[in-house]
Image: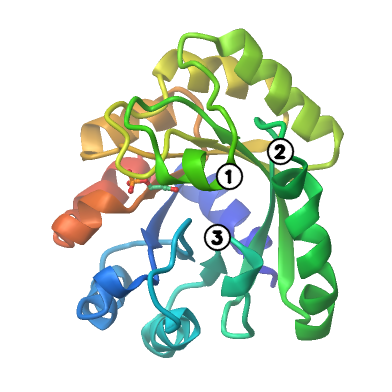
Amino acid sequence: MSVFTKLNSVIDEKGAAYVVLIDPDRKNEDSLESCVESANISGVDALFVGGSLMMDGKCNDRVKRIKDVSNVPVIFFPGGVGQLNSYYDAMLFMSVISGRNPHYLIGEQAIAAPMVKDIGIETIPTGYMLMDGGAGSTVEFMSGTRPIPMNRSDIAVAHALAGQYLGMKLIYLEAGSGAKEPVATTVVEAVTDALDISVIVGGGIRNPKIALEKVKAGASIIVTGTVIEENSNLMSELADAVHWRA
Ligand code: 1GP
């Protein structure tokens, strides 16, 4: 069964899926295994692994360490083609569709595609939309794209629909890691009402109440990163909140 099919069955059965983002950067060097072990026993449905900025050359080693311990699918959440390797179970094949930077719309993808084919990794076409979470995110700087203003549901809906009609299987509504404000509930509602495909919401989600609010607004997958780096004990509560139907 493909990773995408597995995620969809979780969404069907439990109402939504809960994903923990692990940044394979040196800042998490000492906590990788313990974080994955917690995820294994906390109801986490998958791990996203990736980040916008790597400050050393050990990313691939860390992905292998994550994969060695994980009991759940390890999904590449690409910050760039340099983080691609054969340890992942699948990858979000993403395009930054909220932006106007051709390199992140199709350039990086064309560099990656032959390697993706060679490795044979499962690809999940994903339209990535950066919303303004108020913290001036790393991804905003590294992708050279302007985030969509959070009060512009209309702009968000237009981009998400364009992603759907281009054939994306998922839309990722991203407020940016460490966002001051998560993606507004009004935006989640407007986008999920307009779309037939599932929506991932991440960035600035810091507690189960906010996670559940986004799910009730229509999100199918909730991602948390920063809050778990700070306190991995929160995983169970977040998973329970997201799995509202279970
Ligand atoms: C970033 O959406 C993820 O891509 C997670 O964000 O670190 O703020 O949880 P946080």
Q: Nearer the viewer, residue 146 or 218?
A: 146
Residue highlighted by disc 2: 101
Left or right: 163 in relation to 150:
right
Residue at 55% x, 58% y: name it. Answer: 79
| Image height of 90 relative to 30, above or below | above
Q: Secondary structure at mark 3?
A: loop
Question: Does any atom of ligand 1 lie closer than 8 Å to the CB of label 3?
Answer: yes
Instruction: Find the distance from the CA under tag 3 to the CA under tag 1.
Output: 14 Å
Q: Secondary structure at mark 2?
A: loop
Instruction: Find the distance from the CA under tag 2 to the CA under tag 3.
Output: 19 Å
Residue 184 visible within the image: yes
| Image height of 23 relative to 129, above or below | below
**Sequence-earlier tag: 2 or 1:** 2
Residue 53 at x, y percent in the picture: 44, 60
Identified by mark 2, the residue type is: Asn
**Sequence-earlier tag: 2 or 3:** 3
Residue 121 at x, y percent in the picture: 72, 76
Instruction: Find the distance from the CA under tag 2 to the CA under tag 1.
Output: 7 Å
Q: Which mark is residue 77?
A: 3
Residue 14 at x, y percent in the picture: 45, 47
Residue highlighted by disc 1: 143
CB of mark 2 within 8 Å of CB of mark 1? yes
Identified by mark 1, the residue type is: Ser
- Label count reads 3
